[in-house]
Image (cartoon, rainbow, N blue to C red):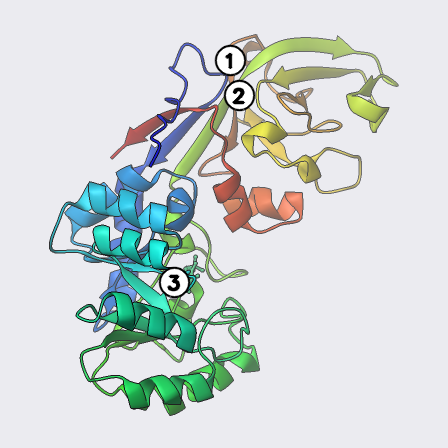
Amino acid sequence: MSATIPPAPPAREEAQAILTINLGALVENWRTLSRIARGAECAAVVKADAYGIGLEPAVQALSKAGCKTFFVAHASEARRTRATLGTGGARIYVLNGLLADADVAQSLIASDATPIIGSQEEWSTWRALAPQRPCALHIDTGMNRLGASADEARIIAADANASAIDLVMSHFVASEESDNALNARQISAFDGLRGLFANAPASMANSSGILLASKPHYDLVRPGYALYGGNASPGLPNPMRPVVTLDAPILRVRPVKAGATVGYNATWTARRDSVLAAIGVGYADGLLRSASGAHGARAGEAIIGGVRCPFAGRVSMDIIVIDATDAPKEALKPGAMGRLLGDEITVDDLAHRAGTIGYEILTSLGRRYHRVYVS
Ligand SMILES: *Cc1c(COP(=O)(O)O)cnc(C)c1O
């Protein structure tokens, strides 16, 4: 195996923007979800670098708070999670399973991680390579993505001894839509099949699933998004605390006359004499280009001197121009910070303005930020 050293994130004095990650809020969100799902164990989904906030700090904070079960997607994430947790104690489940591949299986064994298998092929691979080790089973109930079909689940059940499967799970298609009829249909399909594995604890709920009125919590819940401050019940008040704050410095302040255009392709025209502030963050840092500012369309915003100011023109790779005409003058100088994410502009808010979901905002957070972890 060739080892490469990942480049360290930029130091404070090198970075154009600062990402502050509140691990205290992360832990508080986990405790809130544990309370809501009380009676069930509350795990933590830390795939994709803990939704962009950093796998190691997230795992460390949650483990210290008492979280005993972690879900990742890839073998490499399992390895990093195990290195952070140390041996023994906490369990690591790997959502993307084994790929029915012996090398992946060996990597999981080395990390003392448990694959979530979803096919007969994966089942046979794991049984052959790790006969003493349990695995988890994902039963598909309508996503048609990963997971065993009902027929495959029956075949595996007939072949499995009682201790071979230590978690049986399924995944919601649309749990953030609390009135979607698919939720009840999936729960009923799951209830019809999980009895095949009567000794195994069961798990169904992601963040939004935890908040469903029908409380499909079973034995273990698997929140991701809500842990990181996302609103898992869109349209209702968010019971979670924001975890990320993003600040970027003003690089240039420029007064312009009405009629001046801004940025690539001149998609924005000043309708009045305006003050523009160029800030040092762009789509290469995860500020999606689809949040570009055009009159009449929902554009991204930055808070400058306490005032919400819209993006003006195209988001470019390293720079966004803000229409800061309404910001207080004293806040408009190079080096002063504009806030792009935080208590006021939430991940869900920016996502809405970029035409996407907060999950994509979080997991797109760039590698050029100076990162500050606070608790
Ligand atoms: C990502 C994922 C989760 C977590 O979902 P959130 O909506 O982020 O809470 C849970 N279960 C599975 C199978 C997943 O892939």
| Residue drawn at 21 percent across, 41 percent down | 84
Label 2 to label 1, Cα distance in Å? 9 Å
Residue 368 visible here = yes
For discs 1 and 3, the disc positioned in front in the rendered view? 3
Crowding near pointer 1: few (<14 within 10 Å), some, many (20+)? some
Q: Are marks 1 and 3 in contact (CB under 8 Å)?
A: no
Rendered position, 319 above or below 344: above
Q: Are marks 3 and 2 in contact (CB under 8 Å)?
A: no
For residue 324, side relative to residue 207 (left or right): right
| Sequence-first tag of 2 and 1 | 2
Q: How many marks?
A: 3
Tag 3 residue: 97
User: On the image, which quarter does residue 95 sit in?
Assistant: bottom left
Q: Which mark is residue 336?
A: 1
**The C terminus lies in quadrant:** top left
Q: Position of residue 100 (x, y in %)?
A: 41, 65
For discs 2 and 1, the disc positioned in front in the rendered view? 1
For residue 313, side relative to residue 39 (left or right): right
Rendered position, 46 above or below 130: above
User: On the image, which quarter does residue 36 sit in?
Assistant: bottom left
Crowding near pointer 3: few (<14 within 10 Å), some, many (20+)? many
Q: Position of residue 338 (x, y in %)?
A: 53, 22
Crowding near pointer 2: few (<14 within 10 Å), some, many (20+)? some
In-front residue for pair 262/91:
91
For discs 3 and 2, the disc positioned in front in the rendered view? 3
* Amino acid marked by disc 2: Gly
Label 3 to label 2, Cα distance in Å? 48 Å
Tag 2 residue: 305
Q: Are marks 2 and 1 in contact (CB under 8 Å)?
A: yes
In-front residue for pair 349/317:
317
* Amino acid marked by disc 1: Ala
**The N terminus lies in quadrant:** top left
